[in-house]
Amino acid sequence: MKYEKLAKDIIKNIGGKENVNSLTHCITRLRFKLKDEAKANTEVLKNMDGVVTVIKSGGQYQVVIGNHVPDVYDDVVTIGGFQESSEVSGEKVSLFNKFIDTISGVFTPILGVLCATGMIKGFNALFLTMGWITKTSGTYSILQAIGDCLFYFFPVFLGYTASKKFKGSHFIGMAIGASLVYPTLSALTVGKPLYTLFAGTVLSSPVYVTFLGIPVILMTYSSSVIPIVLAAYVGAKIENGFKRIIPDVVKMFLVPFCTLLVIVPLTFIVIGPIATWAGKLLGAGTLAIYGLSPILAGIFIGGFWQVFVIFGLHWGLVPVAINNLAVLKYDPILAATLGASFAQTGVVLAILLKTKNIKLKSICIPAFISGIFGVTEPAIYGITLPRKKPFIISCIVAAIGGGITGFMGTKIWIMGGLGIFAIPSYISPKGMDKGFYGAIVSIIVSFVLGFLVMFLVGFKDEENKEENRETVLVKKDVLVSPLKGEVKLLSEVKDEAFSKGALGRGIAIEPTEGKVISPVDGVLTTLFPTGHALGITSDKGAEILIHIGMDTVKLEGKYFTTRAKQGDRVKAGQLLVEFDIKAIKAAGYSLISPVVITNTDKYLDVIETDKKTIDFKEELITVVI
């Protein structure tokens, strides 16, 4: 496991695995639902190597990792032994937080595939526009099939994730979704309807078939979002009800049998039409607001988009955009956010070029690359937000970028990728129109303006301050080597008290010179009369045990000479004990010598050297306080 140590530290500082109700992840964050957030060591997590920051939002405890979050997530799940999340917390959560949690829980698992298929569909549109392929070619058809597969069968995929979120059977959820896109039902809408409901209104609905005499409003559910999410929620409740009353011996097939017989007709007769009508009204309402002033709407959405991301509120707009794409075949809302990632990236590039701080540069490089591809959390949390001014500049510039898309009437036509991979999403079915060029202008202006404003306005580099800040947040106690010789792992020591870490974490040395020096400034708190073992308490509180050889206590001090006494104040490098290596080995004793921190549990970490051999006074162990 590549991130085993980081995973262990995260689990420890969120209050242990017993404090976790559920765990998911998105593009950059581990999203925990904790039983008690007060048990989490938030400040420790924030300043941990490998963690960008910690956000508490939407009822979730979000540990921001970066682009490699899937790998960290896998290690956290493996080490924590987390199963399918079972939420048992009795904590009251607001309706708004429940909404955000539900949206993220349903969409997060398929976000990667959603972006991937959207990118393929977008590039296919680009290739078609450039004249590289034709609509009649096999290449176009296959690429379109890949790009369309998830979005066309969206109810099937969302049936799985929504049922998982609502604690229902995943495959029942998929069956509900599959019934909504069953092709034969679409064929029933050909010809004259039996009659029309709500004729003459925005909700006008022709009725072609009935179910047990009840009118069924057949709608196009491919690419839809709201109907299947609601159906999965109701279906999970119905399923759990049947589980309570159906005998165990026939539960395996009768529960799905009864559930599907109830929920699928209910979805077609009630849930689907109501949800679809609500979707139409929502899309119409969103566009009505946008229609009042596309420029102001673009400025507002673009300017505050990064703030929405910080608090996880951007999930509230995602289903609106997807709904618009399903109902209207386009969406202008998310189009206004295009400039945000490029404004952030331009600001980061300016900081990268201006800073003299090596640590800040090392953060800027991957944050810049991520930003180009639309993932801005590393830039926000690691660079711009902590320095305030860069973040404010990026928001102002993003607002200008949003205003440009509003002015140009820019729309997204497919749910595509992020950053530069989002560009094909702005190509309309008619080709590269004014809206597409508005997207390009927004990208260029946002990036260039973000870079120039940040470069000219400048920021306080705080090179020395950053070093001091690290010293304050992460205090260290460095132990030099008390012995000279070959470095060994504690697990190689043939004594379980040491090899299994019962006495604390540390390292072992096979000495090549018969001397022991003090590894720190401190007090010689323990010195065995035999001279084979000693304990030192450093001035910073580390309790260090040095044990010379294995079972050498049986020598009763023979071949050992002490050069200090118990209670003495000692300095790093001061000679404490001498011993005769040849004589001890000749007596049949192993001289592998553990050096351990006996109060390990009081520290954030104990970091051992990775050297194979070591000399006196070279750094051996670093204790992170």
Image (tube, grey):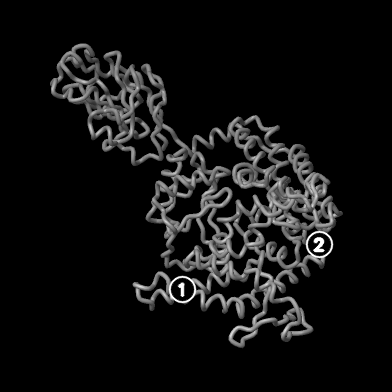
Frontmost residue, 37 versus 178: 178
The secondary structure type at the circle numbered 2 is helix
Q: Is residue 267 above or below residue 194?
A: above
- Image coords of residue 335 (percent x, y): 75, 56
* Left or right placement of residue 405 versus residue 62 in this view: right
Q: Estimate the x, y position of residue 440 in percent, counting from the top left.
A: 81, 47
Dot 2 amino acid type: Pro
- Residue 345 vertical position relative to residue 620 in the rendered view, above or below: below
Image quarter of residue 192: bottom right
Q: Amino acid at mark 1?
A: Glu
Instruction: Kindly identify which numbered label has been placed on residue 239.
Output: 1
Work out which quarter of the rendered image holds the N terminus and state it.
Answer: top left
Decide which of 294, 134 is in the foreground and name it.
134
Q: Nearer the viewer, residue 270 or 335?
A: 270
Q: Give residue 200's mark.
A: none
- Residue 487 seen by the camera: yes
- Give left or right: position of 120 versus 32: right
Query: x, y (%) of residue 272?
Result: 63, 75
For the point 38% across and 28% down, the residue is: 621
Can residue 339 be seen here? The reply is no
User: Measured along the vertical axis of the image, is residue 131 above or below residue 265?
Assistant: above
Task: Rate crowding at label 1 as few (under 14), some (14 to 19) or many (20 or more) other CA atoms within 10 Å.
Answer: many
Badge 2 density bin: few <14, some 14–19, many ≥20, Cα 10 Å: many
**In which quarter of the view is residue 336 placed?**
bottom right
- The quarter of the image holding the C terminus is top left
First in sequence: mark 2 vs mark 1? 1
Please name which of the two marks, 2 or 1, marks the residue nearer to the observer.
Answer: 1
Question: In the rendered view, does 260 fall on the left or right side of 548?
Answer: right
Q: Residue at x 55, y 42 (%)?
A: 68
Q: CA distance from mark 2 to mark 1?
A: 45 Å
Q: Which residue, given by chain and number where applicable, does mark 2 sit on? A: 294
Determine the image quadrant of residue 231: bottom right
